Amino acid sequence: MKLYITYTKNSFTNEQIRNLQQVGEVIFLEKVFELDKAPYFEDNDEKILVVDPDWYNWDINASHLSKVKNLKAVCLSTTAYDWIDLKYCKENNIIVCNIPKYSTDSVAEYAIFLMMCLAKKFPLQLKKDYKMEYSIPMLTTEIRNKTVGIIGLGTIGTKIAEICNSLGMNVIYWNRTEKNNNYKNVDLETIFTTADFILPTFATNEDTRKLISDDLINKMNGNAIINVINNPEEIYNHKLLLKLAEEEKISYAFEIYDDGKKMYDYKGNIMATAPYAFYTKEAIERLVAIWCKNVISVVNNNPQNVIEE
């Protein structure tokens, strides 16, 4: 069994590499390669692809997979799995594993950090080069007793709810099924018309793409929306939110996904950062540990964290 790992070797401990070598021939592909000339295309041996999305532009499609001979499994480095063609894998008996819950605390904490930045007008402070200006536009707000609306009460949404609750905030949420009796389950319109801070934390799939309509966005009244879970373009009208924020009608925080802009390019109380929400020392260590276990479990014919969809 050959294990093609598209990631940096120094992210793995010596012990992890030894454990992988006990079940297969480990081949690290540390440099980004041309996808139509992937090094493993010419290899006829049985293999597992251990893949990170950055090497594949977040798209492992059927065309690419069909060129891989004797592919037993694909072990993803992410919780998200919408960047691989699951239908093709299922039809061709290719196992796909992901890495659940490795960055729950990291992402939840980052979301709270962004919420605080918006509440304290930190983006405006930066853009004004810290010039003191005691005016209404610079007036900040306390978060205690404010209402936070969480859209999707999964693992990360629940962690955010716990933190917000501990900070004295009123937590409401929307979920397709009721999840937690400690918080009030409401419809999306209630969240967009009443919540002071809105956090979409649902998984992106065919059912949830563009879940947040323009009509809902236009019902926001001085609210703030914080998104660190999804690519903005996939779940709502990103340009409309930018427009409303630049008109100082709302506040908005998100991670930039290669649109060529920097935070200083946006007007209004907009906090735009690089996609670092998941990127903590602890989360990466958990990621790599689970990743290795996934690979070994597949070789031992007892795969874990298999995506069943």
Image (cartoon, helix red, strand yellow):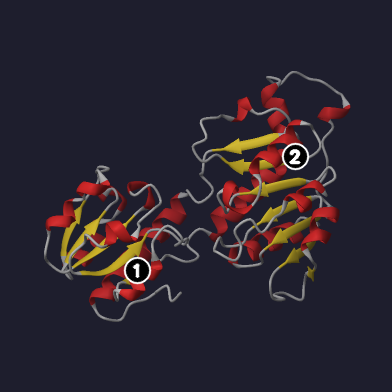
Residue 150 at what x, y percent from top left?
A: 71, 60
Local crowd at mark 1 within 10 Å, few (<14), some, or many (≥20)? some
Residue drawn at 17 percent across, 51 percent down: 39
Q: Is residue 3 left or right of 114 when viewed as pictured? A: left
Q: Is residue 190 above or below residue 214?
A: below
Question: What label does residue 251 carry, if any?
Answer: 2
Quadrant of the image occupied by residue 190: bottom right
Q: Which residue is mark 1?
A: 88
Residue 222 at what x, y percent from top left?
A: 83, 42
Query: Which quarter of the figure is the N terminus placed in?
Result: bottom left
Quadrant of the image occupied by residue 252: top right
Whether residues under marks 2 and 1 lie with C-beta atoms below 8 angstroms apart, the answer is no
Residue drawn at 35 percent across, 68 percent down: 88
Q: Is residue 120 left or right of 136 when viewed as pictured? A: left
Local crowd at mark 2 within 10 Å, few (<14), some, or many (≥20)? many
Quadrant of the image occupied by residue 131: top right
Three-letter amino acid code at the position of disc 1: Tyr
Could you tell which of marks 2 and 1 lies nearer the N-terminus?
A: 1
Three-letter amino acid code at the position of disc 2: Ser
Q: Is residue 109 above or below residue 1?
A: above
Please state which of residues 227 and 34 is positioned toward the viewer in this rendering.
34
Q: Residue 244: in sight, yes or no?
A: yes
Q: Tag 2's secondary structure?
A: strand
